[in-house]
Image (spheres, helix red, strand yellow):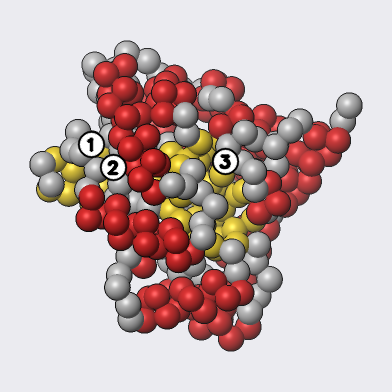
């Protein structure tokens, strides 16, 4: 099985998110980590402590940028001021790819600061793909779009979520950040088969995978990122690695963050599944 077409970085292995509670440990202990994912918006500043810290991290580690405010699905045109700051950061980090979410969250310059699900229509797919192309051409770096967890659906949708994701990335000719926890969360909230989702997306476009913990409530599941990955999500991840091959993987843990060692240990559980994908690639 060849490396994914949108993943020339199959050696990236397992990453974790760079989070404030772990700064001191990382800088003093210099633990062995394959790479760190940073939230781009936290470092899109002109100077000061954030960039000083980032430069120290870059001296020791590989960094991949992940955004939370591009809102590819919003009708607004890309914000040029935002893109200029983002491009400056891209040049600073040397990120091999950049990811953000397949969602909307702004109207006429007013931002919700949330990742809202989209109507799965062909018109929305065309507009979203055009925006992704514009951003990619300006930033001059490959882009992967991430599927979000959702708690509501639009009656006007013309296709499934995975068909919409496929329509967007094929039109935009971009990659996918496949969040298997989000797939599981949405599958339980909306009653679809998560394995049908995985089987339905173009595996050769998956450049990165996210795993995370979620919380079960009586009537729905919430994407909380506040505890270890649950077994059903690991099983989905195993299936994803069989489909996609060796793919850079990140553990998200953003609330009730424990020690660095605990987060890193949880992330490294993915290595067992990556080893399986490597063995699969060696088969004739």
Quadrant of the frame with the N terminus? top right
Q: Nearer the viewer, residue 92 or 264?
A: 92
Name the residue tied to disc 3: 207
Q: Which mark is residue 71?
A: 2
Q: Tell me: 77 left or right of 5.
A: left
From the top left corner, tell me how far across and down residue 98 is, in percent.
46, 49
Q: Earlier in the sequence, mark 3 or mark 1?
A: 1
- The secondary element bearing badge 2 is classed as loop
- The secondary element bearing badge 1 is classed as loop
Name the residue tied to disc 1: 74
From the top left corner, tell me how far across and down residue 82 is, in percent.
26, 55
- The secondary element bearing badge 3 is classed as strand
Q: Earlier in the sequence, mark 2 or mark 3?
A: 2
Badge 2: few (under 14), some or many (20 or more) residues near its Cα, within 10 Å?
Answer: many
**Which residue appears farthest toward the top when viewing the image?**
158
Residue drawn at x 60%, y 49% as measured from the top left: 249
Q: Tell me: 163 left or right of 4.
A: left
Q: CA distance from mark 3 to mark 1?
A: 23 Å
From the top left corner, tell me how far across and down residue 17 is, in percent.
50, 62
- Residue 94 in sight here: yes
Residue 23 sits above or below residue 61 on the image: below
From the top left corner, tell me how far across and down residue 79 is, in percent.
22, 48
Residue drawn at x 86%, y 35% as measured from the top left: 282
**Which residue appears farthest toward the right when viewing the image?**
284
Residue contact between numbered discs 1 and 2, judged by CB atoms under 8 Å = yes
């Amino acid at each position: 099985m060849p490396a994914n077409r949108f993943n020339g970085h199959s050696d990236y292995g397992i990453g974790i998110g760079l989070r404030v509670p772990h700064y001191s440990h990382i800088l003093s202990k210099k633990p062995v980590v394959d790479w760190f994912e940073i939230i781009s918006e936290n470092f899109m500043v002109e100077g000061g402590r954030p960039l000083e810290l980032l430069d120290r991290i870059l001296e020791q580690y590989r960094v991949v940028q992940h955004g939370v405010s591009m809102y590819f699905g919003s009708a607004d045109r890309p914000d040029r001021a935002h893109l200029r700051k983002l491009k400056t950061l891209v040049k600073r980090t040397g990120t091999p790819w950049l990811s953000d979410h397949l969602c909307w969250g702004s109207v006429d310059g007013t931002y919700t600061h949330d990742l809202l699900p989209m109507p799965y229509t062909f018109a929305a797919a065309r507009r979203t793909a055009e925006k992704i192309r514009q951003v990619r051409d300006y930033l001059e770096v490959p882009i992967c779009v991430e599927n979000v967890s959702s708690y509501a659906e639009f009656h006007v949708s013309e296709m499934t979520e995975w068909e919409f994701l496929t329509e967007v990335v094929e039109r935009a000719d971009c990659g996918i950040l496949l969040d298997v926890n989000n797939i599981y969360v949405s599958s339980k909230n909306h009653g679809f088969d998560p394995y049908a989702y995985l089987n339905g997306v173009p595996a050769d476009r998956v450049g990165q995978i996210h795993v995370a913990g979620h919380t079960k409530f009586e009537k729905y599941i919430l994407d909380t990122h506040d505890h270890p990955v649950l077994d059903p999500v690991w099983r989905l991840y195993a299936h994803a690695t069989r489909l996609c091959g060796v793919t850079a993987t990140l553990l998200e843990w953003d609330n009730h963050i424990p020690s660095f060692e605990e987060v890193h240990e949880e992330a490294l559980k993915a290595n067992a599944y990556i080893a399986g994908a490597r063995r699969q690639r060696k088969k004739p």
